[in-house]
Amino acid sequence: MPFLNTLLEHLELITHAVLAIGLGVFAWLEIRRPRARDQGDKGSRWQVNITLYVIGAVFMALVFERLSEGAIRLGGSLGWGGLAATDWPTWVKVVLGVMLMDLFQYLLHVGSHYVPWWWRLHKIHHSDTSMDASTSLRHHPLETLLNAFVLVLLLAAAGVPVYAILLYALLQQVHGLFCHANLALPPVVDRWLRLLVITPDMHLVHHSIRLDEGNSNFGMVFPWWDRLFRSYCAQPAQGLLAMRLGIDELADRAKPATLGLLALPFVVPRQVSAPAGQTPAGKRIRRSRRDRR
């Protein structure tokens, strides 16, 4: 399909445009219906988060094309066409492809919390002590590159069709802004909506500084994987407004600027911090049944 091929060729530019528009829309909504009114030095946080995104985008533009070609060849070396080669209806392949991509993203997210060297990169995202739409941009460039490479490898191995990739890429971009937004949804709306997608209140729990709460709600767009794999936590122990965000390693310290965050994965922490949701011995902390409801 020439039209789809054209969209895929310009996918990076399209996602950047969607991100810029979405960021403006959610920034306006956060002013209208904020969950938390005290966002600290919001201007500095936005500057840092946007700068990290730009650095990551430049980094991806410079090196990812060659890496993705290698990932596609490696993933396609299985010798089968996967989902794209089936004679199923197009809509079935799109739905299954989107679901597979979301499952892959869930698994990558879990890995970034439980693999120590991976967590050293991912903790940059969790270092934000307030959360709003700009937090979705806060990633270390090396983590962005690593996740993209592994995801392309998995997609090639599974034979996910290109139209499913295009649809999910745009969906994830918009939803990433939504689930990080400092947005107060009516409780009844949040309760029903989180049956279909990750809501801001649901994802906020994942950014808790508490070890047991931070290692929950890993879902990227859809909440079903957390429920299926028993990593769902409905509410934080201290409540959404009283809970602390961030990582223990930086608690009660001056918040690092962009260069400090870029260097953070390579600096030995003052006090060794286990990935969120693990004890220092690497054992997962069990949550009560109340927290899983």
Image: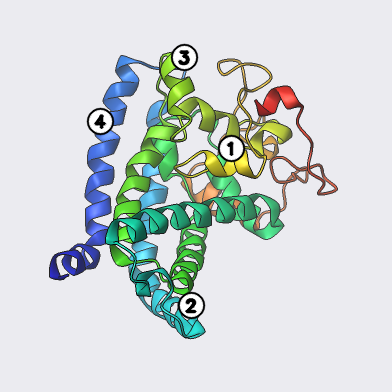
Q: Element under label 2?
A: helix
Q: Position of residue 162 (x, y in %)?
A: 30, 66
* First-in-chain label (4 vs 1): 4
Residue situated furthest left in the rendering: 3
Dot 2 crowding, Cα within 10 Å, few <14, some 14–19, many 20+: some
**Which quarter of the picture shows residue 242?**
top right
Q: Nearer the viewer, residue 118 or 91?
A: 91
Q: Is residue 143 above or below residue 253?
A: below
* Lower position in the chain sequence, tag 2 or tag 1: 2
Q: Which residue is label 2 attached to?
A: 75
Q: Amino acid at mark 4?
A: Val
Q: Depth-wise, is mark 3 or mark 4 nearer the camera?
A: 3
Query: For the residue marked with disc 1, what is the amino acid?
Result: Asn
Q: Position of residue 15 (x, y in %)?
A: 27, 52
Q: Secondary structure at mark 4?
A: helix
In-front residue for pair 74/53:
74
Q: Residue at x 45, y 57 (%)?
A: 101
Q: Which mark is residue 217?
A: 1
Which residue matches tag 3? Answer: 187
Q: Are marks 1 and 3 in contact (CB under 8 Å)?
A: no
Q: Which residue is label 4 attached to?
A: 25
The answer for how far apart the CA atoms under marks 1 and 3 are is 18 Å
Per the model, the C-alpha gap separating discs 3 and 4 is 22 Å
Vertical relation: 286 (above or below) 240: below
Q: Earlier in the sequence, mark 3 or mark 4?
A: 4
Q: Residue at x 41, y 71 (%)?
A: 159
